[in-house]
Amino acid sequence: MIEGSDPMIRHVDWTEVPPSVAVVETVSNATGREPTELPSLYDTIDSDALDALCTDDGRDTEAITVSFVYAEQEVTVLGGGTVIVEPIEER
């Protein structure tokens, strides 16, 4: 992804692709790096907790928003099945 470009937005069915996997795949696509070249997601966020939070059948997951920085990208995961990745802006 080119600095200053539009964010990469991916819509996902969490029953087919867990949120943690979708984050790594989307960041990989946004940065042009292979998933194996990215740092471990678990070093940034508890990936099991992210998956559980976004896929809990007993909770209104549509209201969930989780944002964090991973592999020099700003990542936002929406409980309804969206991953948004954009480069960290220079401040």
Image (spheres, grey):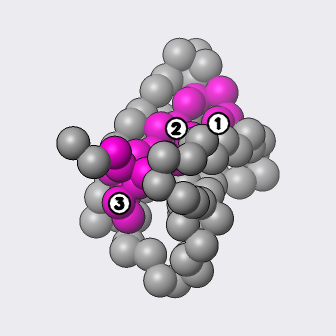
Question: In the rendered view, would you say 79 is above or below 18?
Answer: above
Q: Which residue is mark 3?
A: 72
Sequence-wise first label, 2 or 1:
2
Identify residue type, mark 3. Glu
Residue at 54% x, 58% y: name it. 2
Task: Calculate the distance from the C-alpha at mark 3 to the C-alpha at mark 2.
Answer: 16 Å
Visible in this render: residue 83? no
Identify residue type, mark 2. Val
Residue 77 marker: 2
- Provide the secondary structure element on which disc 1 rests: strand
Can you give x and y, in whole percent of width and height, for residue 12 in the image? 74, 43
Identify residue type, mark 1. Thr
Q: Which residue is mark 1?
A: 82
Task: Calculate the distance from the C-alpha at mark 1 to the C-alpha at mark 3.
Answer: 19 Å
Circle 3 or circle 2, nearest the eye: 3
Sequence-wise first label, 1 or 3:
3
In depth, the one of 63 and 2 nearer the eye is 2
Residue at 66% x, 41% y: name it. 9
Q: Is residue 41 left or right of residue 29?
A: left
Residue range highlighted in magenta: 69-89
